[in-house]
Image (tube, rainbow, N blue to C red):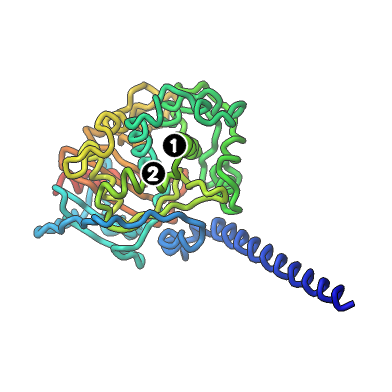
Amino acid sequence: MKIVRRIGISLGIVLAVGCLTIGLFFRQEAYQFYKVLTFFDKENISNNFKSTGSIFKTRSIPKPSNSVSFPVSKIQFALPDSYQLNDSTISTQAFLDFTLTDALLIIQHDSIKYEYYGNGFKQNDHHISWSMAKSVVSALFGIAIQEGKIKSIEQTVTDYLPDFKGTGYDNVRIKDVLQMSSGVGFNEDYGDFNSDINVMGRYFALGMPMADFAKRLKREREPGTFNHYVSIDTQVLGMILVKATGKSISDYMNEKLWSQINAEDDAYWIVDKAGMEFALGGLNLTARDYAKVGQLFLDSGKWKGKQIVPQQWVRASVTPDAPHVMPGKRDNAILADGYGFQWWIPFGAKDEFDAQGIYDQFIYVDPDKDLVIVKLSSNYHFKTDKKRIFHELEIALFRAIAEKI
């Protein structure tokens, strides 16, 4: 009887521990789900953008031993009091306040000319990149091609990911995925609760692998004919990168990029349940390190004279090469920016290009002015139907800064 009793007690302990473990697991899942649903509420948005590492599972990239800070220029730049967009005059400070600017950093001639932090942010605070991460993934892709890990962008997704046969990505050229022209159907309307992008966010909040979500998407158009922004395209690029290099995005980035550009702080990626980085928007850096990414591309992929990202790749990344990715009026009569390999070319640009993320995140590069501008924001006013006007206001501000500096 004593043995039976001991077995019963042992089973009870095992069941109790198991139930506690399951309870804690679902509690974390429920917490993440709640945080995603309320992530952009105005009361919490800035803090959420600063503390994604406390909400989601992450993978860190350590601060390199050769870390170097940008020097601070002895002559500091004063922002223009106002600037023009079409026939309107916009107060610079009012616009920065209205868009909840968390950081504004201006680098010219490799030196800090202006640095501002708001909404509780400080110099060493991390800020989620959102889609600016796509431009970093593109840089890593170019390095992998240079190394021969990826043979050509003329290859297809299914050459590297055979389990994507029968999905919307079956036999789609890598180049078309890089140019957001995969032909995959995807609704990226953040204002629509049931859009693909919002369903994807809830899917991720529950810890589900992004690969499973990507495989659900279907072909809508002929690949390589229409520029349609599909965030999951970059997730697929990330999966190709992992398969081709045999390393996580974080490890590859640490070896090939982070340790090479004297990054000032550590970095981290949000990862899903399978341990895959949220390549489409889960990178977290400080403002100064976002500026280093911009500086790297400003200098054609070189850092202190060493070629980090192939020069040809940098050029191709910021050069639209087909009618459907050119800036201007498109077939759907919408005024659009140009698109390269996960980098944007603003409408009316001479040589400028930028990385962009929702809620007004920017790395803006103007080679003629030897200028990099980083603007990190928690613009809770952001909605898809207002996206274009906010974008035009941001670009107009950057051009006013470039003109005055």
In the figure, 192 relative to 287: above or below?
above
Question: What separation in Å lies between label 1 and label 2 (alpha carbons)?
Answer: 9 Å
Instruction: Say which mark, if any, is on residue 241.
Output: 1
Q: Position of residue 328 (x, y in %)?
A: 34, 29
* Left or right: 155 as drawn, with respect to 71: right
Give me the residue at 51% from left, 61% from top: 55
Q: Amino acid at mark 2?
A: Tyr
Q: Which mark is residue 3?
A: none
The x, y position of residue 366, in whole percent, is 21, 40
Residue farthest toward the right in the current orientation of the protein: 1
* Circle 1: element type: helix
Classify mark 1: residues with Cα within 10 Å, few (<14), some (14-19) or many (20+).
Answer: many
Q: Around disc 2, counting alpha carbons within 10 Å, would you say few (fewer than 14), some (14 to 19), or many (20 or more)?
A: some
Residue 62 point in image, percent of width and height: 35, 56
Residue 6 or residue 383, whichever sits in front: 6
Tell me if label 1 and label 2 are in contact, CB under 8 Å: yes
Sequence-wise, the earlier of marks 1 and 2 is 1
Identify the residue at horizontal 32%, vertical 31% (top origin).
146
In what element is the residue under mark 2?
Answer: helix
Number of numbered discs overlaid on the protein picture = 2
| Pointer 2 residue | 252
Q: Nearer the viewer, residue 49 or 98?
A: 49
Q: Is residue 319 left or right of residue 405?
A: right
Residue drawn at x 36%, y 44% as measured from the top left: 356
Residue drawn at the location 18% of the way across and 53% of the way down:
80
Instruction: Tell me the quarter of the image containing the N terminus.
Output: bottom right
